[in-house]
Image (spheres, rainbow, N blue to C red):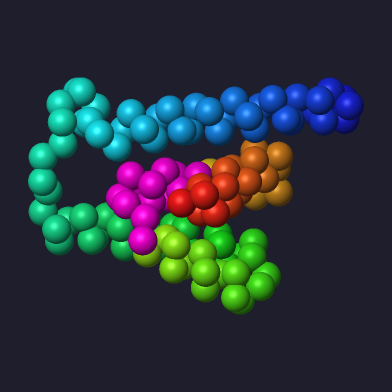
Amino acid sequence: MKILRRTLTGPIIACSLILLSAVYSWGSSTTAEGVPRQGTDLHSKELKKDSAMAKILPVLESRVGDQKLLERAKDKLALMDEAEIRLIASLCERISLDRGTPDADIAFLLVTALIVLS
């Protein structure tokens, strides 16, 4: 069982990254209906970003031991756009729900990749 899990982990991570990048690139330019996005209220964007950050920061604080790395991650998060923040927040929700499982570990790997590569 462990051998099977090891052999499947790499392809699962690769497929997840490909799917995430496809969803992110599609979602950043259009709405769910395929209509180009219009300007939205700045205040509501800030509220959404703040609520998403409230989901992200506790996960990062619990998983990242180095304070310097945590500060760099916070700086990068502050520069990200709303779609990236929402994606990371949804992954952090998954991490919070599935603590200690391989699913949570893969989700954290994806969060890390998104922050580092931003």
Q: Is residue 59 magenta?
A: no
Q: Specify the segment rendered in magenta.
A: 79-93
Residue furthest toward the front?
117
- Residue 84 located left or right of residue 71: left
- In this picture, is 13 found above or below 107? above
Regarding residue 92, the answer to whether it shows in the image is no
* Residue in view at x 74 percent, y 30 percent: 9
Total tally of numbered discs in the picture: 0
Q: Nearer the viewer, residue 98 or 33?
A: 33
* Principal secondary structure, stretch drawn in magenta: helix
- Image coordinates of residue 80 in percent, x first then y, are 37, 55
Regarding residue 2, the answer to whether it shows in the image is yes
- In this picture, is 94 found above or below 115? above
Residue furthest toward the bottom?
67
- Residue 93 located left or right of residue 1: left
Q: Nearer the viewer, residue 19 or 54?
A: 19
* Residue in view at x 48 percent, y 33 percent: 20
* Residue in view at x 16 percent, y 36 percent: 37
- In this picture, is 51 found above or below 113? below
* Residue in view at x 46 percent, y 67 percent: 74
- Residue 118 located left or right of residue 33: right
Q: Quadrant of the N terminus?
A: top right
- Image coordinates of residue 38 in percent, x first then y, are 11, 40
- Image coordinates of residue 59 in percent, x first then y, are 55, 59
- Image coordinates of residue 117 in percent, x first then y, are 52, 49
